[in-house]
Amino acid sequence: MSVNKEVKRITTNTLLRMKEAGEKISMITAYDFSFAKIFDAAGIDVILVGDSASNVMAGHETTLPITLEQMIYHAQSVIRGIDRCLVVVDMPFGYYQSNSDIALASAIRIMKETGGHSVKMEGGKEVLDSIKRIVSAGIPVMGHLGLTPQSIYKFGTYTVRAKEEEEANKLRADAKLLEKAGCFGIVLEKIPAALAKEVSESISIPTIGIGAGNYCDGQVLVMHDMLGINTEFKPRFLRQYLNIHDLATNAVMQYIKDVKSRDFPNEHEQY
Ligand code: KIV
């Protein structure tokens, strides 16, 4: 019997038990009620209300512009759609980096106003004080290391991180710090698979990989990428399970044709 099937609701403890049992954790992003409902009913373990909403929902080039209010709106919509999975809400850029008072206030707003179950924050040592205060307030925190998109202007590129020893050592140390600070999991984004394996084996909390190979304790993908809504983004790590872009285009083209030709609505589709 899988740990996932034993529980009525997935909690942060369930994820820890899944890691201990060697059961992989499935995580996907969602930003609205309808998709959250589909993913939850399909049996997903974790929904991430990612700040990738800034890209895929709002059309921005980076995740930096999204506001706390916008994240709260998306998280509220997701929460209305789910019964069982754990919901992690991204803390947006600018609402936790400056000091731990602001970070704690942002996390409290997310928890109070959305009904979300936890928050996610990018970074290691730099944001450790904030993480500790948020955890002390009883709010579960997921870390995020490797390619942290909120720092894209520092990196200058979306290429694989921690290939050099110095950056890999910092990541190893940061993972330990996040574990010690009480994080319940860590997203590892776009780092070498061997490093992700080593980090996953060196800490007791689950790692969730995106472009970090098969040895992480779980995997996360952005829904628009894996469902083929956004077909322009084709990194090597992405497996596209559907092509909604083409399906939706064909459906809408057919609808337009039917309206123009007066085929729609027919006598059965009217009152
Ligand atoms: O915002 C997001 O979608 C994320 C994932 C890429 C992990 O942080």
Image (spheres, rainbow, N blue to C red):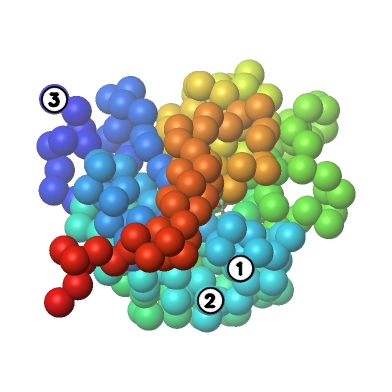
Tell me if label 1 and label 2 are in contact, CB under 8 Å: yes
| Residue named by callout 3 | 1
Q: Quadrant of residue 135?
A: bottom left
Q: Is residue 184 left or right of residue 120?
A: left
Q: Is residue 56 left or right of residue 60?
A: left
- Which residue is at 25% across, 42% downward? 42
Quarter placement of the C terminus: bottom left
| Mark 3 CB within 8 Å of ligand 1 | no
Name the kind of residue labelled 1 in the image. Ala
Query: Most extreme residue toward the top, as rendered?
Result: 194
Q: Find numbered disc 2 in the image and state the secondary structure of the residue it sits on.
A: helix
Q: Residues within 10 Å of mark 3 (few under 14, many from 20)?
A: few
Q: CA distance from mark 2 to mark 3?
A: 39 Å
Tell me if label 3 and label 1 are in contact, CB under 8 Å: no
Q: CA distance from mark 3 to mark 1?
A: 41 Å
Quarter placement of the N terminus: top left
Tell me if label 2 and label 3 are in contact, CB under 8 Å: no
- Judged by depth in the image, the label closer to the viewer, 2 or 3, is 2
Mark closer to the chain start, 2 or 3: 3
Give the answer, above or below, for where 70 lies relative to 150: below
Mark closer to the chain start, 3 or 1: 3
Where is residue 150 drawn, in percent x and y? 70, 58
Name the kind of residue labelled 3 in the image. Met
- Which residue is at 68% across, 49% downward? 148
- Judged by depth in the image, the label closer to the viewer, 3 or 1, is 1
| Mark 1 CB within 8 Å of ligand 1 | no
| Residue 58: image tag | 1
- Judged by depth in the image, the label closer to the viewer, 1 or 2, is 1
| Residue named by callout 2 | 70
Where is residue 108 drawn, in percent x and y? 44, 77
